[in-house]
Amino acid sequence: MSRDPHVSDIVAHTHCVCWKTAMYIRLSREDGPEESYSVANQRALLLEHIQKSGGELLPSGTYIDDGFTGTDTNRAGFLGLIRDIRAGKINCVLVRDLSRLSRNYYEAGYYLDNFFIRMDVRFIALEYPAIDSYRHPEQMNSVLIPMQNVINDDFCRQTSMKVRSVFDMKRRKGEFIGAFAPYGYAKDPKDRHHLIVDPEAAETVRAIFLWFTGGGLSKKSIAEKLDTLGIPNPSAYKRLKEPHYHNPHCSPTSRGWSAATISGILSNPVYMGDMAQGKARVKSYKIHTQIRIPEDEWIVVSGTHEALIERPLFEQAAALSRKRRRQPSHSKTIYPLSGLLFCSACASPMHRTTKGPYAYYICSRYKKYAKAGCTRHCIRADELETAVIDAAKRVITLSGRDACGASETASFALTRKGRLNELEQAYFYRDGLYEKLMDGTITRDTYARLHEQYSAQIAGLELAVDDMAHTAACTHQDHASSDHALLFSLIDSVRVDEGYAITILFKCSNPFCGKQTKNRP
């Protein structure tokens, strides 16, 4: 019987195929503690299969993703495998089972039914079910494969639901579940779900709140000030403290602060001792893109840890943030009426503008649309600010409150006077040591030791007094900032009418609250 030449060609072609085989190994937390899924066991199983192939399968690379979920293909090892397939380095993929390739039903189907076929890639899975797209191509059309992919996908769905349920339970109990503590805190070594104060970063957090609420600095100015002081931003600080820290949204070399970072600190309830979690969630267990959750849906538990900021100060900062405060480009501070001044006709914010030697406030809608938007409502800035500040101080006087932080000023003065008295006493005691040495009251060693102690005390007190003098000078220079803090604590808004009439709406209930009319200059 004559042999069919076409059959001979097919057999020859079969024996000439060189299967450049990639062993793909994946392990993730969703696989649990099962030892058979370990990287070492997967590698041993795949190598054994290659050795039994009789040279048909040529080992051409091992691609490992250890600690990566199978719900998406954003894995370094898998992406490297795909690149090498496109480059012609790999034409056979060997895995333990279908779940190693993917636990995403759609993506598993795409690679099995589309990509591998187009790229002439042989696919072998050893278990659940065992398939070989070259030896048994009919298996690829079996209903068992999509069914197994559905089972693998549903396994992830159930795991995701269980994990989310556990996390929500911990959140409701006020337990911290983040990988890294918020800036200003550290994880308690005795309980990783409890936060303790990080003294170094905590001082920076306190300074940010004070600069924003009492210093009149904008978020941008605070960021610039921190950069000038050489203080690393939260991400850089965490990298210094925890070498394994990684933030995918921040450059590993970045140290600079931003207004957004300052805003995040000022709005985080964690700093007043409340645990606020559940601020974001992923779109699904397959799509890991995070979406923000409305604040009223956060899980907040009060008093779970030591506060860095008193609640009234935090609420004041939150109220300031809600006000639209515009920082002038040539200044580091904010004008006294920033965020408080509005047009009485259209309720638009009033903008500050300069003409000649004077500054004026003008309706922003008029400035943008002219008469089609509103009328000018123009008023001199210095006269308006003086009138509003005077009115606020009179309200304070009537209500018995201390204007412009007079109590704080008095406390500061008493503290400085106390330091001066301590300095005078230290000089007196140090100067008296020599007389005691001469009359034999103390020994020379005691004299030397006490003289050194008093000298060190004097140096420290002199430095403290100098710092207080500098602080007093800065306080005088930052008068506008103090005015803004005062006005914001008392006033809800200031409305400007045509004809130079202003309406001041105070937050308090006071007989003086109402309208004050200003005459044309």
Image (spheres, grey):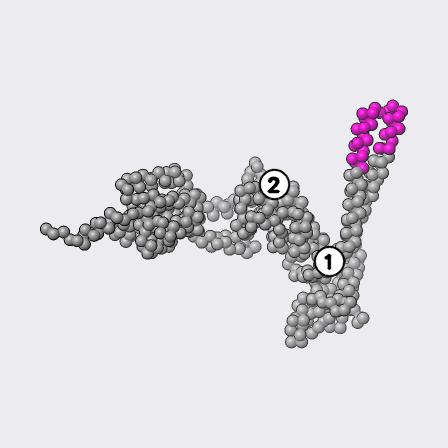
Give percent across and percent down for residue 510: 75, 60
Q: Amino acid at mark 1?
A: His
CB within 8 Å, label 2 to label 1: no
Q: Nearer the viewer, residue 91 or 406?
A: 91
What residue does disc 2 label?
196
Q: Quick check: can you spot residue 399? A: no
Residue in the image at 52% along x and 52% along y: 280
Q: Nearer the viewer, residue 376 or 318?
A: 376
Residue in the image at 59% along x and 41% along y: 241
Q: Counting residues from the N terminus, which is met first, the one under dot 2 or under dot 1?
A: 2
Q: What element does badge 2 sit on?
A: strand
Give percent across and percent down for residue 137: 26, 51
Q: Quick check: can you spot residue 221? A: yes
Pointer 2: residues within 10 angstroms few (<14), some, or many (20+)?
Answer: some
**Majority secondary structure of magenta residues:** helix
Q: For the magenta stretch, what is the residue range?
A: 429-458
**Magenta-span inclusion, residue 443:** yes
Q: Is residue 148 above or below residue 459?
A: below
Residue in the image at 65% along x and 56% along y: 220
What residue does disc 1 label?
484
Q: Amino acid at mark 2?
A: Ile
How far apart marks 2 and 1 lie (CA) works out to: 34 Å
Give percent across and percent down for residue 147: 32, 51
Residue in the image at 14% along x and 51% along y: 3
| 166 lies left or right of 117 | right
**Magenta-span inclusion, residue 108:** no
